[in-house]
Amino acid sequence: MAADRDGPGRQSELTGEIPTALVVMGPSGVGKSTTAEALAAALGWPFAEADRFHPKANIAKMTTGHPLDDADRAPWLAEIRDWITAQAAAGRSTVLTCSALKHRYRDVLRESGARVRFVALTADPALVASRLEHRSGHYMPATLLQSQFDALEPLGPDEDGVTVTVDVPPPAVVARVLERLGLATPG
């Protein structure tokens, strides 16, 4: 059906636009999942949570309070990149979460077949720590938060994206992101 091929998140056969992957990034507890899910809903694009791509060994390591190192992250980032590539090859734009703390990690994601745009969420570390202490059902303990803030590298001038402070309710954060990326619908 032609309408399905050209629906939300699909590459337009008329314009030849490359699908976009919005990567909502930042330390654990900053609001990546909440923001990404709302962005996906607003845009009508598929959503993926990067945590689902972690090998069991990574989850076990974090659960015991040990931060991941670059060797642990390499296969995880490759899985995420490959998912983005597969979605782009099918003509779908996507929204996903990924801590993507370092420039070199983001470089791996940019190797995909999509236009990768980063949405770097920032918040006061004390606020994020408070969120983590009250969050249930996640394997990363609050004790690892400082290691994530220590590793975080801001977006560089060669990276397509925006930095948005998470100091307002989630719908306002999403509106900021859409506006700053030029994806807001007039109305």
Image: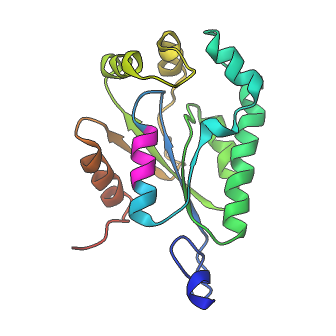
Check the image and report above or below for 81 versus 144: below
- Answer whether residue 36 is magenta in the image: yes
- Answer whether residue 19 is magenta in the image: no
Bounds of the magenta span? 32-38
87 and 133: which is toward the camera = 133
Q: Is residue 75 left or right of residue 148?
A: right
Where residue 86 sits in the image (x, y, percent)? 73, 61
Magenta stretch: dominant secondary structure: helix
143 and 114: which is toward the camera = 143
4 and 27: which is toward the camera = 4
Where residue 94 sits in the image (x, y, percent)? 56, 59
Q: Which residue is drawn at 51% across and 25% down?
A: 137
The quadrant of the picture occupied by the N terminus is bottom right
Where residue 92 sits in the image (x, y, percent)? 61, 68
Q: In this view, does 10 lie to the left or right of 31?
A: right
Check the image and report above or below for 161 versus 77: below
Q: Which residue is drawn at 39% across and 15% down?
A: 133
